[in-house]
Image: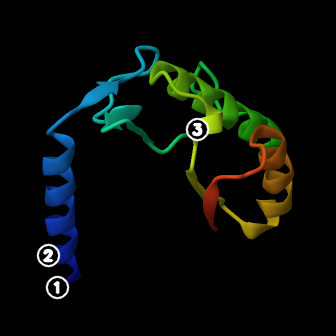
Amino acid sequence: MKTNILITCLALCCSLISMQLAAQTSTKEPVKPYSDFVLQQGIVYTSGLLGLDQAGQLPPSFEQEVLQLFTNLDQVLRSANSDKERVFSVTVYLSSMTQFNTFNQLYITYFKAPYPVRTCVA
């Protein structure tokens, strides 16, 4: 039953997005089956982003990974003619909640109040 609901939702989302689609995929990365962002009715939807550097490598520390993630987000938003001041929703996936305080400290230096709504999962 859950699978049928999921497939129906995905089909609905795909048909809505196909009405007006503006997407860009980074040329620095190997071919991937998704876009970095989709622009739909003036809203930019980004794919999940990682804190990988230009060479596709993970920085040595968690702090550097988060800072690289924000750099990558800035690049995607610029490609969509947007910026972090227009972000209104953020979903964060951490590998452990022990990283939450560190992430949060870096997050509040990147985003300014009023902050986007946020969900954090570990």
In the image shown, does 88 or 77 lie closer to the viewer?
88
Q: Secondary structure at mark 1?
A: loop
Which image quadrant for residue 73? Answer: top right
Kind of residue at badge 1: Met
Mark 1 or 3: in front is 3
Which image quadrant for residue 87? Answer: top right
Question: Would you place residue 16 above or below residue 68 in this image?
Answer: below
Kind of residue at badge 3: Arg
Identified at 46% across, 15% down, the residue is: 28
Q: Circle 3 is placed at which residue position? A: 86
Q: Which mark is residue 1?
A: 1
Between the residue at mark 1 and the residue at mark 3, the CA separation in whole angstroms equals 37 Å
Q: Circle 2 is placed at which residue position? A: 4
Residue 101 is situated, as x and y percent measured from the top left of the image, at 85, 61
Contact check, label 1 and label 2, Cβ < 8 Å: yes
Question: Would you place residue 86 above or below residue 57 in this image?
Answer: below
- Badge 3 density bin: few <14, some 14–19, many ≥20, Cα 10 Å: few
Identified at 79% across, 60% down, the residue is: 99
